[in-house]
Image (spheres, helix red, strand yellow):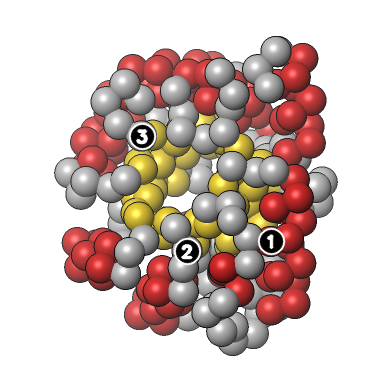
Amino acid sequence: MKPKICLSIKPRSADEFSKLQIMAEHKGADFVEIRLDHIMQPLELKGLSLRTETPRIATNRTVKQGGAFTGSEDERFQILLDAAHSGFDYVDLEDSAENLCDKIDAIRSSGAKTIISNHNLESTPPLRELKEVLRNISKYGPDVCKIVTSAKFLKDNLVTLGFLQEASRELKLVCFAMGELGKISRIVCPIFGSFFTIASLEKGAETAPGQLTIDDLRIIYERMSLN
């Protein structure tokens, strides 16, 4: 099997938006996540999202969720909705978002698919809690469920991977642990059933702790005979 890689980029301007998308396309990523929360100026999304053929994911994280967006919730969602209307393939919505059902309906009406995500920035919960998080997410019927934890111990990799191996049999799920100690789960999560793993374009361009570059992942997968 060939692991799917989502390349996460964080453009800060319209020019950088286009530049990073083209670079991601050249890298041959299976998906590209655009971190819209890092853009420092108003951006007209229409057209910019259509310059490459790789499926695009629109993400707009608040500071509380580990991102950089500081505006209101209405402003944050409007950016995501604009991305959906302008041709993005997926929109990532946190399971804690206000009026989530209404937002899901709006995104789907635009023609985009939904990723409902849960990020634990503090730890990796026990298996029973991960299952409960998944039950809560899956009730919304997303196209992809995403559960990301933080590794404080090496054994946290085993928790996420064991959970993933079982849960991914029933639905599309992305799951791994962030942080230096979670790199193992980032690397092998596709082998255990994750819909994709997430990588950075290059060192220094990470959008979350513990991300490997897409080049490093490809080298590892080649050595594992997975490419």
- Residue 61 pos. (x, y %): 50, 63
Q: Of callouts 2 and 3, which one flags the residue occurring earlier in the amino acid sequence?
A: 2
Residue in the picture at 73% in, 60% down: 22
Give the label on residue 21, or none: 1
156 or 112, which lies in front?
A: 112
Looking at the image, is 94 positioned above or below residue 38? above
**Three-letter amino acid code of the residue under disc 3:** Lys
> Residue 163 placed where, x, y %?
38, 21
Q: Real-space Cα distance between discs 3 and 1? A: 25 Å
**Image x and y of residue 134, in percent:** 28, 36
Residue 97, by quadrant, is bottom left
**Can you say which quadrant of the picture contains the N terminus?**
top right
Mark 3 vs mark 1: give the one in front.
1
| 154 or 224, nearer to the observer | 224
Residue 88: mark: 2
State left or right for residue 196 relative to residue 12.
left
